[in-house]
Amino acid sequence: MSALQMGPHKKASSSDPLISHRRHFGCTVFALCNYPSLLTNGILRLEQMEETPLEDFSAEERREHRVFKQLLDSYPGLLERLRNGSEEEILHVGELIGKGASGARGDNTKSLKSAILDWISLKGAAIQPPLHRNSKIDHGFNHELTGSLLCPTGLDWHDVETRENLHSGKILVCGDQWPVFLYAHYTYDAEDPWCGLLRSRLLICAYKHVFTSLSSVDKDPKATRSGNARLHGMNCVTIASIAYITTQVRFSLSSSSVFSRTDTSMDSETFYHSLLDLFEDPDESKEVDELLTWWNRQVFPTSSAAKWPISANSALSKIQIKRLATKNAADSNVAVAST
């Protein structure tokens, strides 16, 4: 009997295939989600869409429905099971999926907590004062290094008053105030906020750590075990996976001890959604496409999604140059003949 056929009162186990399959879905499609509500709302919306087009729903409802459809597409037979199942069974399936996503998030949070300290320290230099690996009480704005990385763009961490206000909580940081660690070399350009955005080495290290293998963070990976990406047939970066890793790194640098979508001090849900809002904005599609290409070159360099330019002086480049010259000449002849 499949996981989708299990009775609603059966306790979910860690070996349940639906749980293990959804661990990856939560990291790459949508992380901070109430899955029982997602399924219930999705089924109701399908009925409503028989009379009302999706375009008439709110932006939040359209995003939720896209996630719902991706979930259905990734698990054959799920839609039929949900339509034929009782409300109690739908909730049970949602809880199974949620348990898988939550388990993956918890494992990644635990793994990153210690690893991230190796990536933020200068090579060969110890962090001073030292940061605890098993406790986060001295992280966040309580420490010079983590505080400087978490400092919102637009604020000056080197300003004593600003630093003290962030440390004391007098300045509250909302989820849509992005920290400087999102930027390449931790440098933010107020005149060009897209410059270097989501291209920091720290994010790449964390992404490889979670999705490819623990040792792939190094330039010369030696891991023999398949990472999460290979196990799930993942050969390109998704916008949701970038948002997920960025949210995880932000939490790892903070002094918060428990990752929760409803944590008001970290405002992780707002932060995660603010990144998705940017990625899904049609007006930003050019920059987002360029960003995804850059990420794929860092993480999946052999994938077609990396879109490497053709090597100069290669046979292929010569063929394309010659073909273009022939086409231009033909177009010129046509233009002359028509005058």
Image (cartoon, grey):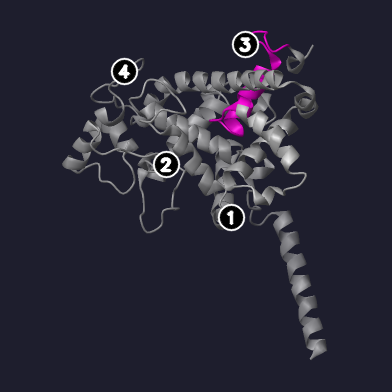
Is 268 placed left or right of 26 in the picture? left
Q: Is residue 89 above or below residue 253?
A: above
Report the disc number at residue 182: 2
Magenta residues, start to end: 7-36
Q: Is residue 288 left or right of residue 85?
A: left
Horizontal and vertical percent position of residue 167: 23, 32
The residue under label 1 is: 282
C-alpha distance separating marks 3 and 1: 39 Å
Mark 2, secondary structure of its residue:
helix
Name the front one of labels 3 and 2.
Answer: 3
> Neighbour class for label 4 at 10 Å: few (<14), some, many (≥20)?
few
Residue bearing the label numbered 3: 14
Q: Earlier in the sequence, mark 3 or mark 4?
A: 3
Residue type at mark 1?
Pro
Q: Which one is in front in this view, the residue at disc 4 or the one at disc 1?
A: 1
Crowding near pointer 2: few (<14 within 10 Å), some, many (20+)? many
Across and down, in percent, residue 306 comes to 63, 44
**Residue at image mark 4:** 132
Amino acid under label 3? Answer: Ser
Vertical arrangement, residue 5 with respect to residue 177, above or below: above
What residue is at 66 percent from the left and 39 percent from the top?
65
Closer to the camera, 120 or 46? 46
Q: Is residue 54 left or right of residue 283?
A: right
Q: Quadrant of residue 73?
A: top right
Q: Name the residue at the bottom extreme.
A: 339
Disc with the residue nearer the chain's start (1 vs 2): 2
